[in-house]
Amino acid sequence: MFPVFAPAILALADGTVFEGVAIGSTGQTVGEVVFNTALTGYQEILTDPSYRQQIVTLTYPHIGNVGVNDEDVESGAIQAAGLIIKDLPQLHANFRADQSLGEYLRREGIVAIAGLDTRALTRHLREKGAQNGAIVALREGDALTDTVRAQAVAAAQAAPSMAGLDLARVVTTRAPYEWTQTEWRLARADGGRGYGQLTQPRFHVVAYDFGVKYNILRMLAERGCRITVVPAQTPAADVLALQPDGVFLSNGPGDPQPCDYAIAAAATLIERGVPTFGICLGHQIMALASGARTFKMKFGHHGANHPVKDLDTGRVSITSQNHGFAVDAASLPPTLRATHVSLFDGTLQGIARTDRPAFGFQGHPEASPGPHDIAYLFDRFTALMAAAGK
Ligand SMILES: NC(=O)CC[C@H](N)C(=O)O
């Protein structure tokens, strides 16, 4: 029996209302509505902690075809505040699937909507900018009234703005832990060579968890890193006491600016000459720690086909992206140089310290599913640690 879907609406803070059907839990969710243009990877997107308090609309129309499995997760749970898609196939098929997308959303209590015009919504967000929204998913038989619409718009307007929000401290691990992984969990973003091999640990990396994605840890482990993951608010002195060969600053949700504890810790560790690599939020924190500024973008970058140019080599990589803030290229102090730039809008994508072994990248070199063009940055990090005497 195919399910009968109850009505649902998406209301934006500017008063625009889209109607569709409920494909997840019933109830209401609020968050910043952003669009992601990747064709694949809906499970990785939903479980990426950087999507906390964001409602994601996927521009690819058929989402759910291959169901859901317990391997393709980037964290232990769905992190996005909600999901918006055009069409949920009524049957899924994949040998690895153990449930449907709808079942997964309901099991995790996520409110989601399908059946609306995601192209119109995406155009709207591109023109007006990312803004807060509310999804209201009604129970079967409940009527969609003007009161429900008005309440949803009011809920969207009452939601907190992403600018100024420190969410890293919300999603981070409560206690430090050592990353371990089994064969089947090894990274797939290894340049298409298939499943990677664990290498005998050569480096000890302390990874700040601001909302870290599993595949980053897998790719570091594959390159011979033993990894101690620490909470976002761990002081630099505690990290130095672990005698790391390198420090990794992870991706994560929210605005980097209020993460003063992380900015202070990163500044100390970089100053002390510890090889440091930052991805996305970690890259932004490294920039702030070095005296640059960040700003909120109009609708950000969320997709898997963004061309980025390496300014040192001229090489263009197709990259995965997920960010709503960026480092202001005009704010770089003399100790920071631009290493990568987005060929979509010219915004800064990579930075490196001129006086210390530290660099950051705005996109996702660990992208799983790919593209894997920029995975070479992980090798750059291990090379920095090797050069520092390991
Ligand atoms: N993926 C990330 O780390 C995102 C960083 C930050 N939250 C932003 O939106 O820009």
Image (spheres, rainbow, N blue to C red):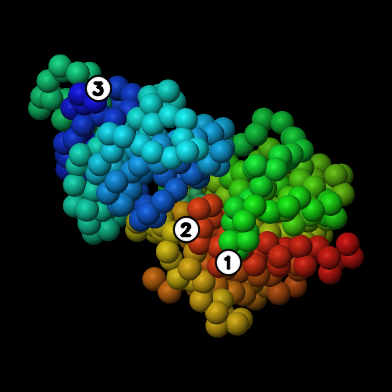
Front residue of 381/241: it is: 381
Q: Which sits earlier in the primary sequence, circle 3 or circle 2?
A: 3
Amino acid type assigned to the residue bearing label 1 in the image? Ile
Quarter-of-image position of residue 8: top left
CA separation in Å, label 3 and label 2: 38 Å
- Helix, strand or loop at disc 1? helix
CA separation in Å, label 3 and label 1: 45 Å
Name the spot of residue 150 as percent of width and height, x first.
Answer: 16, 30
Front residue of 61/27: it is: 61
Name the spot of residue 32 as percent of width and height, x first.
Answer: 35, 43
Density class for disc 3 (Cα within 10 Å; few <14, some 14-19, many ≥20) is few
Residue on which disc 1 sits: 374
Residue that appears at 60% across and 82% down: 313
Residue that appears at 85% across and 44% down: 242
Residue on which disc 2 sits: 321
In the picture, the disc for residue 1 is 3
Relative height, residue 235 to residue 336 (above, below): above
* Direction from residue 52 to residue 260 in the image, left or right: right
- One can see residue 291 in this view: no
Front residue of 130/59: it is: 59
